[in-house]
């Protein structure tokens, strides 16, 4: 039985547990130190129930390997996994901070620009995961982490599927959290990338409104409501949400997956379009100040202070060190500037919805948001009136939030007391009332005040005229150059004291070289000696060549320079010559004349076409390597196992299996048989027999000698196991049995003494029946017979 682990223990002889961060239904998350790489990590110890489930551990290993291949900064990285003394564990990137759930609890609903700043990195992470065949299945605020340096990351990839596949006993078992499940997860249990997009749409709805769209009496009732009811637009609950943001969330949460946004890439593209149209600038997403991480950090500080007796300066804890290590990179969208606290996910476990509903109910009213505004993004003004599109309903107060001030970067959020359009900062006009009489002593002072007012007005007029002269009064008017040639226009501009500079513009009507006009235009006034652009037609644009390095960025820049619009084709095309992601071709082709603003489609390379894994079973390892390289694949991990159906060194199986399609240069893991056939060494010299067995890869020990009539002393009689048997060369030890048989020598005609000496030299025992000193005329056994050692040989002699 495994013992409980705690701070100070070493997991897998590598990870030292420092302090717990959070404890949930399925796991406990620790701040740990990787003693091998000297860095801090988050180590998730899974519950003993899961660790004791062999199918879960196997599934978790596969999922961890898949997630480890993801390198997007929006995914909490998985560094290691294992099983140590009954404890299954995952080692992940450390993200000091907290979860979206903790932010919502602390600050309340988010303004639209903060919601978009959350969606961008999560959609980027999902795009890469879906591209690698991974589906999260449990998108919710508890699984979205925000670090203290404002990076946003998605956690717990693979864990949901591992739990689901280890516990599933029927097709009606669904994994996930009730409030965020897609309809198909409820109805059939089936999931695809669009299921993740639905769940993320629900998360965005909650971030904007402070609540999820469906709330039932039980978690199962909450989950099943979405089968019959569409998700309403967020503006039906909170005012000030742009109409196209409403449409985006409604589109992402369609009940029919085929009517939904098709991919994370498309979702991200729509997010950028909505943000651009509504000037929803990116802002740093604030980490929660009250989170599992901060509470663990404060607990560690209290324990350190108690250990020092409260005397002396405050001691630095391991949490302070880890936070400092993770804050070295600047916070920016798309950059994994720090590590994350993969703790809150453990505190909000996911359960099974089956015959016995066990879904976490995460929908709850939020607390009044504390704090004050943190500032506005570039271009935004504090207190800007909230916009409402015509179809939006009046705002519905959400507890006391309808009058609360935003505590997010960028000013007031939706439904948070923004004034209506045209009335920002206005106050009611005072009511009319009679004025008091002016005291007599002040009336003379009024006359002097009038004189001073007149003097000030005269001074202002003088300064105004001077300012006009120094400003626009001495400006030069740009001449009208219509109908002139380019040289004539340049001369006309020079004639009024201005400088001209030619600039080419593409134009669908004017031939190349014709004058299009000036910038500034005719009649505008500019400073003397200023520069006026002479706009010259470059004719109709022509599709440029693909850049020399075939990079998408350089090719798009060349297309934009010609006043054309670059558009990337939805599907890439495979190519053995052009690297993946590079521009393969343009449509229309380079050299084609187009109109200004026409689109040019960039077809990107998908890299080499996928290839099928060949049949490798039965091939020697070297032959299997050649077969893989011949189709553009390579040998990955090679493991060994005993298989009596294949000779030693031959391939037993491959992973992936034969016929599966892989990208070029992908690794294929091979399992090679360790079986060895025991050679027949009977009658060989012992040294020769030992060499023959070792040549077959077997370990040899010598056994007790045996008497064999057909095998003489010094020769090999047999082996254990017997010749021609297939054995595991890695674990089997072969016992080599030598012969101790002796061939009886010819002693007839020898004297008794000489005959006795010959017999003793062979290990035999002479016995004289008659004639002690005479010549031997009889012996038994006869000469040439094979006998065992110490066999008695009877001699008969004359005399």
Image (cartoon, grey):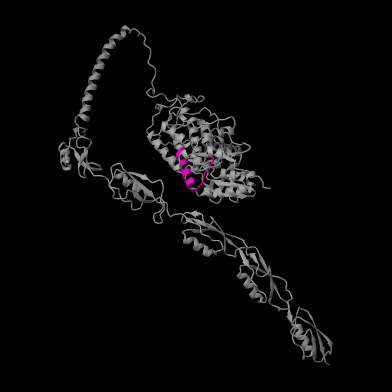
Q: Nearer the viewer, residue 403 or 194?
A: 194
Q: Quadrant of the C terminus?
A: bottom right
* Residue 531: quarter of image: top left
488, 467: nearer the viewer: 488
Task: Inspect the magenta stretch and tell me whether residue 473 lies in it.
Answer: no
Secondary structure mostly taken by the magenta-highlighted segment of the chain: helix
User: Can residue 313 be seen in the rendering of this structure?
Assistant: no
The answer to which quarter of the image holds residue 681 is bottom right
User: Magenta stretch containing residue 135, yes or no?
Assistant: yes
Q: Is 262 displayed left or right of 549 in the figure?
A: right
The x and y percentages for residue 741 are 73, 78
Estimate the x, y position of residue 720 in percent, counting from the top left. Answer: 69, 68
Q: Position of residue 481 (x, y in %)?
A: 17, 37
Measured from the top left, where is residue 174 in percent x and y?
A: 58, 40
The image shows a total of numbered marks equal to 0
Q: Residue furthest bottom?
A: 799
Q: Give the residues drawn in magenta, as a range.
A: 119-138
- Res 421 visible: yes
- Viewer-side residue, 659 vs 73: 659
Residue 258, compared with residue 415, is above or below; it is: below
Horizontal side, residue 470 vs residue 659: left or right: left
Identify the residue at image location x=44%, y=27%.
Answer: 239
């Amino acid at each position: 039985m495994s013992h409980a682990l705690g701070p100070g223990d070493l997991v897998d002889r590598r990870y030292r547990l420092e302090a717990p961060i959070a404890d949930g239904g399925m796991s406990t998350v620790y701040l740990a130190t990787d003693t091998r790489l000297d860095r801090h990590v988050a180590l998730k110890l899974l519950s003993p129930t899961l660790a004791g489930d062999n199918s879960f551990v196997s599934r978790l290993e596969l999922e961890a390997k898949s997630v480890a291949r993801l390198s997007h900064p929006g995914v909490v990285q998985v560094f290691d996994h294992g099983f140590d003394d009954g404890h299954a564990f995952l080692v992940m990137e450390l993200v000091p901070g907290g979860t979206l759930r903790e932010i919502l609890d602390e600050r309340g609903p988010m303004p639209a620009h903060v919601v978009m700043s959350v969606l961008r990195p999560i959609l980027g992470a999902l795009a890469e995961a879906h591209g690698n065949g991974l589906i999260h299945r449990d998108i919710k605020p508890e699984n979205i982490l925000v670090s203290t340096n404002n990076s946003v990351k998605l956690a717990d990839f693979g864990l949901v599927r591992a739990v689901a596949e280890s516990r599933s006993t029927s097709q009606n078992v669904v994994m996930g959290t009730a409030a965020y499940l897609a309809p198909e997860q409820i109805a059939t249990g089936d999931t695809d990338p669009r299921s993740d997009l639905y769940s993320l749409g629900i998360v965005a709805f909650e971030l904007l409104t402070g609540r999820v769209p469906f709330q039932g009496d039980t978690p199962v009732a909450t989950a099943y409501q979405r089968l019959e009811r569409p998700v309403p637009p967020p503006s039906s609950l909170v005012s000030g949400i742009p109409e196209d943001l409403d449409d985006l969330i409604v589109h992402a949460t369609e009940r029919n997956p085929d009517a939904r946004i098709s991919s994370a890439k498309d979702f991200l593209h729509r997010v950028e379009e909505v943000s651009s149209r509504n000037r929803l600038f990116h802002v740093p997403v604030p980490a929660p100040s009250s989170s599992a991480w901060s509470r663990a950090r404060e607990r560690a500080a209290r324990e350190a202070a108690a250990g020092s007796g409260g005397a002396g300066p405050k001691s630095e804890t391991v949490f302070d060190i880890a936070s400092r290590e993770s804050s070295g990179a600047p916070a920016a969208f798309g950059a994994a500037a720090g590590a994350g606290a993969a703790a809150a996910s453990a505190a909000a476990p996911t359960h099974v919805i089956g015959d016995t509903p066990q879904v976490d109910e995460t929908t709850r009213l939020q607390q009044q948001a504390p704090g004050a505004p943190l500032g506005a993004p570039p271009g935004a003004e504090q207190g800007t009136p909230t916009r409402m599109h015509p179809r939006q309903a009046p705002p519905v107060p959400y507890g006391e939030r309808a009058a609360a001030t935003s505590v997010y970067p960028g000013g007031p959020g939706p439904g948070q007391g923004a004034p209506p359009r045209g009335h920002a900062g206005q106050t009611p006009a005072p009511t009319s009332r009679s004025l008091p009489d002016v005291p007599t002593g002040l009336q003379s002072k009024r006359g002097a005040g009038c004189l001073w007012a007149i003097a000030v007005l005269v001074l202002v007029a003088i300064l105004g005229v001077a300012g006009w002269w120094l400003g626009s009064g001495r400006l030069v008017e740009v001449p009208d150059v219509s109908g002139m040639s380019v040289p004539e226009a340049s001369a006309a501009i020079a004639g009024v004291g201005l400088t001209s500079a030619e600039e080419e513009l593409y134009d669908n009507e004017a031939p190349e070289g014709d004058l299009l006009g000036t910038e500034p235009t005719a009649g505008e006034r500019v400073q003397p000696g200023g520069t006026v652009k002479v706009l010259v037609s470059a004719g109709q644009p022509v599709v440029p060549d693909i850049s020399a390095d075939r990079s998408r960025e350089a090719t798009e820049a060349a297309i934009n320079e010609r006043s054309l619009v670059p558009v990337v084709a939805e599907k890439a095309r495979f190519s053995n010559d052009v690297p993946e992601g590079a521009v393969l071709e343009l449509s229309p082709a380079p050299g084609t004349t187009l109109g200004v603003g026409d689109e040019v489609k960039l077809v990107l390379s998908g890299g080499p076409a996928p290839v099928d894994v060949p049949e490798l079973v039965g091939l020697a390892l070297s032959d299997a390597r050649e077969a893989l390289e011949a189709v553009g694949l390579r040998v990955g991990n090679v493991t060994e196992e005993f298989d009596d159906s294949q000779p030693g060194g031959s391939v037993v199986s491959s992973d992936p299996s034969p016929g599966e399609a892989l990208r070029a240069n992908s690794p294929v893991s091979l399992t090679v048989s360790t079986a060895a056939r025991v050679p027949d060494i009977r009658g060989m010299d012992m040294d020769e027999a030992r060499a023959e067995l070792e040549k077959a890869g077997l370990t040899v020990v010598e056994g007790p000698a045996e008497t064999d009539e057909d095998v003489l002393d010094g020769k090999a009689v047999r082996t254990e196991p017997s010749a021609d048997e297939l054995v595991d060369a890695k674990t089997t030890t072969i016992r080599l049995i030598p012969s101790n048989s002796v061939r009886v020598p010819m002693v007839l005609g020898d004297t008794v003494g000489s005959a006795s000496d010959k017999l003793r030299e062979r290990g035999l025992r002479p016995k004289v029946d008659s004639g002690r000193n005479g010549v031997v005329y009889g012996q038994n056994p006869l000469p040439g017979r094979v006998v065992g050692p110490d066999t008695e040989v009877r001699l008969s002699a004359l005399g």
